[in-house]
Image: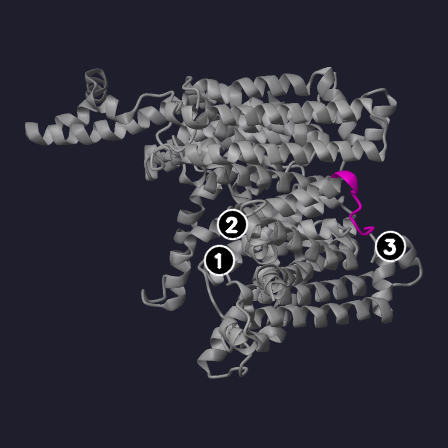
Amino acid sequence: MRNYLNIIVAYSIMMLLIILVGIFQSWSIALTIFNYCMISAVMTLGANIQWGYAGLINFGVMGYTALGGLAVVLVSVAPVPEAWSVGGVNMMTCLGIIIIMIFSTRYILKNIQKSKKKNYLIAGIIIVGLILIKIIAGPAIEQIEAVDPAKTGFLGGLGLPVLFSWIVGGLFAAGLAFIVGKVALGLRADYLAIATLLIAEIVVSIIKHEDWLARGVKNVIGLKRPAPYEIDLQTSPWFINLVEKFHSAKLDLANSLSERQDILNQLVIDASSVYVKLCFAGMFLIVVIILLIITQKALYSPWGRMMRAIRDNEEAASAMGKNVVKQHLFIFILGSAIVGIAGAMMVTNDGLFTPGSYRPMRYTFVIWVMVIVGGTGNNFGAILGGFVVWFLWVEAAPIALFFINLFTAHLPETNDIKIHLINSAPYFRFLLVGIGLLLIMRFRPQGIIPEKIIKQ
Amino acid sequence: MDLINAILVLLNYTIIPALTYGSQLALGAIFVTLIYGILRFANFATGDMMSFGTMFAVLLTYYFQSIGINFGFLPTALLTIPFAIFMMILYMLLIDQTVFKYYRIKKSPPVQLAMVSVGVMFVTQALIRIIIGPTDRRFLDGEKFILKATEFKEMTGLSEGLTIKSTQMITIVVTIIVVAIMFWFLNKTKTGTSMRAYSDNEDLALLSGIDPKKVVLITWIIAGILATIGGILYGLDKSYRPFVYFNNMLPIFAAAIVGGIGNPYGAFLGGYVIAFAEIFLTYAYKRFLVYILPESLEPNSLMQLLSTDYKFAISFSILVIVLIFRPSGIFEGKRI
C-alpha cells in the first residue's frame, strides 16, 4: 500500500481539481475535460510504451491520431452509392495496382542480387505504377468529388457500428507504424524524432487533400455515436422522470406550475448533455482500464524486463540473443496502435472529423509533454500526465485571466497593457505548459510518478 | 522567340521564387546545423526563434514608420535588422544560460536536450503570441517591384513578362552576403577554426586549449544573426504570421538533414535542393510546354506532377528518401 501512496495522492488531487471545476464552472465542462483527459491518457499510454519501455522517440503521434480519426469515418459513415457507381471500380483498381506494386517490389528485393539492374527495376515499377494510378484515378476522383459536393463528394464508409472503428483505428495506425518502423527505426534518436514528425505531416496532408477519401478539409460532420443523442433524451419520458426525481427539492420551490415546467425544461437540457458525456466517460474509462491492466501486466512480464534491458543497453541485450530490431519494431507498432485507438475515440467523442485541426503542436508536442511530466516508463504516471497537462491546457486561460486581473487591479479599465494582456489570455497555455515542461525536466526528470522497478 | 518566352515563364514562376525560398530555407538550415554541430542537439525551437527575431523587426518597423524614418526605396525593416539581431541574441543567451547550459554541463544525451528545446519552443511561442498576437502582419514598405511585367514587355516586345519583386532581390543578395561572411569567418579566422575543431572532436579541442564558453557564445551569436535575418527575409517576402514560422521549421529541418546535418555548406545547398524540388514538382508546366511544343502536341491538362497542396509533403518525402539511402545526407554530414 505504501508503494502506491504517491499515486493515490496524485490521482486524488487530480480528481478533486476536476470536481472543483464541476462545482465552480459547470458539470458539463468538468465532464468534457474529464473525457479529453481520458483520451489524452490513452495517447500518453501509447507514447509511453514506445518511450518509457523501449526508449524510442516517436514525434508522429499526430499522424496516428489522424489515422484513427479517419478509421471512424471509413467504418461508420454510410456508403455513398452514387460515388461508388461512378468511381468505385477505378479506385479499387488503383488499390489493386498499389498492392501489386508492393508485392512485386518485395519479390525483386528478395530474389534479385544487389545490382544496378535491381534499382532500375524497382524505380521502373514505381514510376509505371504511379503513371497508371494517375491515369486511372484522375477522372474517377473528379467524378466522385462532383457527387453532391456540399454533402458527400466522397466514397463514404462501410456503415458499421462506430465502436468497431476504434479497433480499426488501432489497426490503421499499426499498419502505418509498420511502414514507418521499417523505414526509420534504424536512425539515431533525434533523427528518428524528426523523421517521424515529418512522416506524420505527410499522412495528415494526404488526409487533408484527398477529398474523395474523407472530404478533406471540408470535414465530415454528424458521425454516428455509441451514446444516445441529447434531443432523444429530452423527449423520452423516463429521462424526464429521472431528472424530476433527482431535482425534486429544487422543483418544489417553484411557485407556479408554469415556472416549475420552465425549470424542469432547463434541467432536462442540462442533464441530457451531462448524461451523454457520462456515457462517453464510462466507455473511455473501460478502455483506459483495459489498456492499463494489459500494459501493467506487460511491463512486469519477462517481455517487459527484456524491453527495459534493450532500452538501457542495446548491445548487452543483443549479446544475450535478443533481437533488438524486431522488438523495437514490435513495440513501435504496439504503441502506435494505442495512439490510433485514442484518435478514433476522440473523433467519436467530437462527432466530427476535421483533418485541418491536426497540428503537430497539439497532437505531438503536448502529448510528449504529458509523457515527460507524468513519468516515463510508468503507466500510472503516463495517465496522470495526460490528466494534469490536459487540465492545465484547458484551464490555463481562466487561471491566466484571474492572475492578470489580480496584478493589474490597480490599473484603470482603459489601460492599453491591461486590455492587451486580457486579450492574449488564451496564449498563456503555451507559456504554462512550456514552463511546466522545463521545470520538470530540470528538477524531476523522471516525472511526477517515476518508473518503479519491482524486484522479484 | 518562343524559346525565350518559355525560358521567361520558367524564370518567372519557378526559378526566381525557388531561389528566394531556397535562400530563406538555407539561412534557417545553417542555423539548425550550427546548433546541431556545436551544441549537439536538434533544436525544435528553430522556427519560433526565427519568428521571435522577426517580431522585433516588425515592431521596430512600425515604430520607425511612426516617427518618420524610412529607408528610401528599400524596406524600413532592413534598418531594423541590427536592433532585432541584438534583441534576439540577448534572448538566445538568456535561454542558453537558464535552460541549455545545465544540460550541456551535465552532458545529457541529445534526446533530452531536444526535449528541452520543445519546452523552449512552447515558451517562445507563448511570448510571441502574447507580445504581438497571432494575426497576419505586413511590414513591407518602399518599392514593391524592381521590374514589372508590363515594363519588361514594352522594353523587349516579348509576349511574356519578367517580374522581379524587390523582396526577391533583397533576399538573394542579403543571403549571399551573410553566407559569404559566415563561411569566411568559419574558415579563415581563428575563432571560426576553433569552432570547427570543437564540432569535430570536443575532447581534443578542449585539450588544445579552446575555450568552450567562447565557442558556445559565438555559436549563439551567429545563430541569432542567421535566425533573425532568415526570419525577416521570409516575413518581408510573404508576410509575418507566427504560426507559419513553426510550420517552416519542418522544411528547414529537411534541408539541414538532406545537406548532411552538422555541415553548413550542405545545409546551404540543402535549402536550395528542397526549394527547387518543391516548386518544380508542383508547378503546372502547361504554359511552358505551349511555347516549346509544336501546336499539334499542345497539352490540354495542366501538366502538373503534384497539386500544390503537397508542397510540404514533397520536402518531407525527399528527406525520408535521403534518410533511408544516405542517412549522413547528400553532402557528408557532421563536419563544420
- The amino acid type found where label 1 is placed reads Arg
N-terminal of the pair, mark 3 or mark 1, is 1
> Crowding near pointer 1: few (<14 within 10 Å), some, many (20+)?
many
Q: In this view, does B186 lie above or below B287?
A: below
Q: Nearer the viewer, residue B177 or A229?
A: B177
Kindly identify which numbered label has been placed on residue B200.
3
- The amino acid type found where label 3 is placed reads Asp
For this orientation, the residue located farthest to the front is: B296
Q: Does the magenta stretch include residue A312?
A: no
Q: Nearer the viewer, mark 3 or mark 1?
A: 3
- The amino acid type found where label 2 is placed reads Phe
Q: Which of A61 and B21 is in front in this view?
A: B21
Marks 1 and 2, how far apart in space? 9 Å
Q: Where is residue B232 in the image (x, y as percent from the top left)?
A: 58, 67
Kindly identify which numbered label has been placed on residue B129.
1
Q: Which of marks 1 and 2 is in front?
A: 1
Residue under numbered circle 2: A430
